[in-house]
């Protein structure tokens, strides 16, 4: 493959990822899809409607990804989530930090982008602080602390940490078959639970559950199948074009926010190239803004007072540090990662939910004390 073909392929991957991210932002704005909101609804008022929406999206993404593994199109080992090193402590600590932070900041990374599209200036501040703290945890002062502490505690497996790889190694059965069986069984059970109650079958729940899950699957296909190069003519190595990790990726909104700020600040540096993560950040804001404007939901909104400002700043900091430490956010680990059936992703997801519940309980306690 000639270099000009690689550039054309990268452009195609970027446009496809941008378009899918616009769809993600539009659906999220239209349906109020929000992980933090789903957990808050359960803790505060016992309403599971939005949780069914989120669980359905997980089920759809899980089925889609593992069907593609069964077809031989993708391999979890080519992603950030399927390697043999299980960073369980990083997932626990980082996930809990992220979950706690997203409550203080009024939403996770993806919700922050959706709120920016709707005119929320508080979320613009969260975006900047999240991005700076995430970049510091990728390559700066908190990165040194991360590597020296939680990242040093890990379990290294003889095979990939995704469930199909683990079972294939233990049973001798074919990994593609196991991926199909596990993906359909677990994903199907999640979808069945989501649809078991009337509220789970509402138009918004179906649109968000099926639509968001399908977008996650589609981005996996774009980066892992369309953007896959068996042999890069420059390196003679297997490559996945236009991704920051140089592996196949789906949507995630912590490290990509950091890379977006980096690209904006060093735009004249020709080594700073657009990636799937960067265009996905722009795409979500764009999709959200279009729907907000069409539905007359666009409203400028600022901080209420000093305490509101402090909560959002602390929350953004926790999300940036925690999201990078946990290798993802509610979308990066909670949808993209879990769809690969990765052990670390399940740990991170549980920690994110636990951190969010702790923050919600703390907020309720503080309100009770002030009355």
Image (tube, rainbow, N blue to C red):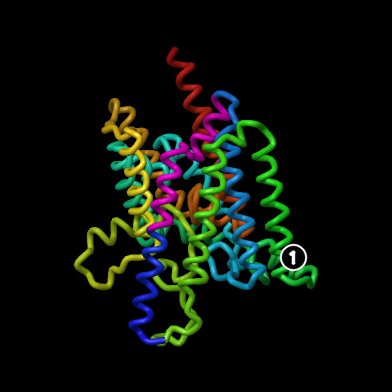
Quadrant the C terminus occupies: top left
Judge whether residue 54 is colored magenta.
no
Q: Which residues are magenta?
A: 19-44
Image coordinates for residue 37, horizontal then vertical, percent: 49, 34
Residue bearing mark 1:
167
Image coordinates for residue 319, horizontal then vertical, percent: 42, 46
Judge whether residue 39 is colored magenta.
yes
Front-most of residues 207 and 134: 207
Image coordinates for residue 352, horizontal then vertical, percent: 54, 44
Name the residue furthest left: 268
Name the residue furthest right: 171
Provide the secondary structure element on which disc 1 rests: helix
Residue 173 in sight in this render: yes
Judge whether 86 appears above or below 51 on screen: below
Quadrant the N terminus occupies: bottom left
Mark 1 crowd level (few <14, some 14–19, many ≥20, 10 Å Cα): some
Q: Residue at x 74, y 71 (%)?
A: 169
Residue 342 in sight in this render: no
Number of numbered discs on residues: 1
Answer with left or right where residue 167 lies relative to residue 46: right
Residue 209: name its quadrant: top right
Type of secondary structure dominating the magenta stretch: helix
């Amino acid at each position: 493959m000639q270099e000009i073909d690689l550039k054309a392929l990268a452009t195609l991957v970027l446009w496809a990822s941008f378009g899918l991210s616009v769809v993600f932002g539009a659906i999220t704005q239209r349906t109020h899809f929000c992980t933090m909101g789903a957990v808050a609804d359960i803790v505060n008022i016992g309403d599971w409607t939005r949780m069914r929406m989120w669980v359905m999206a997980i089920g759809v993404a899980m089925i889609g990804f593992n069907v593609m593994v069964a077809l031989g199109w993708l391999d979890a080992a080519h992603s950030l989530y399927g390697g043999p090193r299980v960073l369980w402590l990083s997932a626990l600590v980082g996930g809990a930090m992220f979950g706690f932070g997203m409550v203080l900041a009024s939403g996770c990374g993806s919700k922050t982008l959706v709120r920016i599209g709707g005119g929320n200036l508080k979320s613009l501040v969260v975006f900047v602080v999240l991005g700076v703290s995430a970049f510091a945890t990728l390559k700066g002062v908190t990165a040194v602390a991360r590597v020296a502490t939680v990242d040093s505690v890990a379990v290294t497996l003889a095979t990939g940490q995704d469930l199909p790889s683990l079972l294939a190694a233990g049973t001798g059965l074919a990994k593609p078959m196991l991926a199909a069986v596990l993906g359909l069984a677990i994903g199907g059970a999640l979808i069945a639970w989501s649809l078991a109650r009337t509220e789970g079958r509402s138009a918004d729940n179906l649109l968000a559950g099926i639509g968001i899950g399908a977008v996650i699957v589609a981005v996996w296909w774009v980066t892992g199948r369309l953007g896959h190069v068996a042999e890069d003519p420059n390196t003679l190595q297997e490559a996945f074009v236009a991704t920051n990790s140089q592996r196949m990726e789906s949507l995630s909104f912590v490290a990509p926010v950091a890379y977006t700020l980096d690209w904006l600040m060093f735009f004249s540096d020709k080594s700073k190239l657009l990636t799937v993560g960067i265009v996905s950040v722009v795409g979500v804001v764009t999709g959200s803004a279009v729907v907000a404007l069409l539905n007359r939901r666009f409203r400028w909104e600022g901080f209420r007072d000093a305490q509101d400002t402090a909560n959002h700043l602390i929350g953004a900091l926790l999300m940036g540090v925690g999201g990078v430490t946990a290798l993802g956010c509610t979308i990066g680990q909670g949808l993209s990662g879990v769809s690969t059936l990765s052990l670390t992703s399940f740990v991170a997801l549980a920690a994110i939910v636990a951190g969010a519940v702790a923050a919600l309980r703390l907020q309720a306690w503080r309100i009770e004390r002030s009355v």
